[in-house]
Image (tube, grey):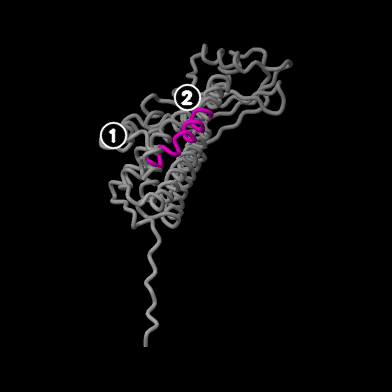
Amino acid sequence: MELFKHDSKIGFMAARKWTAALSILLFICSITSLFVYRLQWGLDFTGGTQISIAYEKPADLETIRAELMKAGFNDSSFRVQSYGSSKDVVISIAPQKNMDQNHLVEKVMHVLPGATQQQVEFVGPEVGQELATKGLKAILIALFAILIYIAVRFEYRLGVSAVVALVHDPILILGIFSFFQITFDLKALAALLAVIGYSLNDTIVVFDRVRENFRKVRKATPTEIINLSINQTLSRTIMTSVLTFIVVAVLYVYGGESMRGFSLALIIGIVVGTYSSIYVAGALALALGLDRKDLLPAEKKPVDDRP
């Protein structure tokens, strides 16, 4: 018991009922927001018009964005990015109400007098719908594979707890994107998948220590073992989360508009993922009845050699 007394400093599981209520409330609010407000789909999913233009000098993307916003285009309805060289720019604009493609192109070229039109293409929403479907399939397949992996490596209660925590994280991220009508594009989807991996890694580290401590600390209760394991991995969790958060925060501030959704999803995911690896995965494993005998190898019965 000396190991337990020395390493256990914070009783995380003492607050598990309150955090469970908070998690359920946030989860319900996120689901409600997704149904009521829905996601603000980005151009990758909605399709739209792509206008390729060229300048005689290197183009200033921020100036182009500012001119388009002055012309009445919403900042979430278009995307400006360089391609090929610094003089070549492609502008992607979502379908506009009461404006056909020709009128749209004329309006864009009118507010950008120094630009020369190169090419105009229309991308239909069918492509975006296919991307959304494939993205959802990727998430579901990843969650199913994770459930099998953890159930085989640890125990099914830990597997279920980990998958619930992984579902909890992206739903909360999507709920925030939905409520504040933040554009959700392919970069944000990539960040969502990255958050699943990040959160899973935290959970695996804690569960590894849980299994180890169940074998080492024989007289502790399951609640004490969970607290002990979280405390032992706390310094690693804090260092990883804080350093990653700083890097992503810098990307959010200086990465430009095109990286805003990606970095914001990661920022939310780091906070939510760290929280869920402690208070969702660990607390749910206890609620499902995790016990020492579930993780210890079965004792071999002695063989009776007598005739």
**For residue 105, above or below residue 47:** above
Looking at the image, residue 216 lies above or below residue 297: above
Q: What is the CA distance from the residue labelled 2 to the residue labelled 1?
A: 50 Å
Which label's residue is closer to the chain start, 2 or 1? 1
Name which residue type carries label 1: Ala
Q: Where residue 87 sits in the image (x, y, percent)?
A: 71, 21
Q: Where does label 1 land, which residue?
A: 15
Q: Is residue 60 visible?
A: yes
Q: Is residue 43 above or below residue 213?
A: above
Work out whether residue 105 or residue 62 is closer to the camera in this orientation and state it.
Answer: 62
Question: Is residue 128 found left or right of 164 in the rendered image?
Answer: right
Front position among marks 2 and 1: 1
The quadrant of the image that shows the C terminus is bottom left
Number of dots carrying numbers: 2
The amino acid at mark 2 is: Gln
Image quadrant where residue 167 sits: top left
